[in-house]
Amino acid sequence: MVGNLQNNPGRSLFVRLVGPTSGPGSAGKYTDAATGDHGDLLDIIRERTGITRFPDLLAEARAHLGRPAPIVPDAPSPKKPNPPGGTPEAAARLFAASVPVAGSLAETYLRSRGITLPVSSTALRFHPKCWHRDEGQTRSIPRPALIAAVTDGAGVCQGAHRTWLAPDGKDKAPVETQRRAMGHLLGNAVRLTPCEDILVVGEGIETLLSVREAGPGLPVWAALSSSHLGAVLLPVGLQRLYIAIDRDPAGRRASDRLTTRATEAGIAVRVLEPRLGDFNDDLRAHGQKALRQHLVEQIGPEDRQRLER
């Protein structure tokens, strides 16, 4: 029970748990007694996010519920000469136009976060003039950015994640929106290293690079958000999954959803929990050796040798 769709305090808006199977007051629907508004989960998402296209509403609902997108047969469709921004094609063009991280402001940024190991140019790159625009602005400004490729199980680029950087690269850009993703993210991930029979998956890029900094032999993927962490598609043949959570309620809920899915697939799961907010906070506060020891206490005995590679 809440006050309204803006989540203000109150009791006028509620979801009926038991009742008729159809109609405005049916089970699973919400009603705002103060305004007479009613609807379902998709209506709430539409109101809160401004999303209007039904396929986009379904994708957002799947992300909220931690469910992967359905697999449907490919259907032939005419190619568009100029795909709009936000498509996988646009993401692939942005990533292809970027340069390796080594020697760039992106490397300066990562080092400022305590990350010193080289990164794969198939996962992370740098763009010196990536267009940026905050909400409500009408003019885009080119800014340096760390670019991450969001790929599917076949290694095809389905999206891109941008982290805009300060002019000296020592921090994120001083703007309202410092990070933004584009393309098809649900079920996919930033594959920072190749996956073997084990995998460490979590939310943020710096978080997973910090885990790798302390355990260079651990394969790591970044799902980019708690919603997408719960829905990431796990590779065939995976035997053991480690979920590197952020210490917040959303991270724990995503971990629970992914744990359930992995366990149903016969995959052994362990949750890796940081001391502070996330593993990059731990790395910067306590250093690489302390983070490695903290991981040793949580990693299964069969995988501890990977921390020393």
Image (cartoon, rainbow, N blue to C red):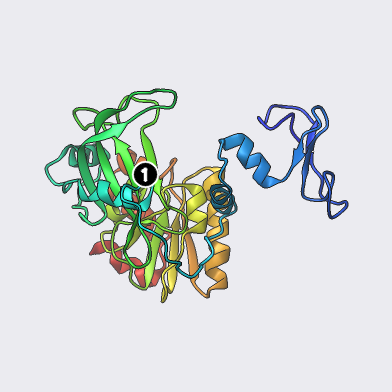
Name the image quarter holding the N terminus: top right
Residue 61 image offset from top left, x and y in percent: 59, 50
Q: Is residue 257 left or right of residue 270?
A: right
At 52% from the left and 75% from the top, the residue drawn is 266
- Is residue 142 or residue 105 the one in the foreground? 142
Residue 289 image offset from top left, x and y in percent: 28, 50
Q: Amino acid at mark 1?
A: Pro
Q: Is residue 290 visible?
A: no
Residue 25 image offset from top left, x and y in percent: 85, 44
Q: Outermost residue, right direction?
A: 20
Q: Is residue 179 left or right of residue 16?
A: left
At 67% from the left and 42% from the top, the residue drawn is 43
Q: Residues within 10 Å of mark 1 (few under 14, many from 20)?
A: few
Q: Is residue 150 visible?
A: yes
Name the image quarter holding the C terminus: bottom left
Residue 238 image offset from top left, x and y in percent: 42, 73
Reply above or below: 120 against 225. below
Element type at mark 1:
loop
Reply above or below: 172 against 192. above
- Determine which residue is flagged by label 1: 84
Q: Outermost residue, left direction?
A: 103
- Is residue 169 or residue 69 the one in the foreground? 69
At 77% from the left and 38% from the top, the residue drawn is 38
At 39% from the left and 70% from the top, the residue drawn is 301
- Dividing the picture into quarters, in which one does residue 303 lie? bottom left
Q: How many marks?
A: 1
Q: Is residue 169 left or right of residue 207?
A: left
- Is residue 307 or residue 203 the one in the foreground? 203
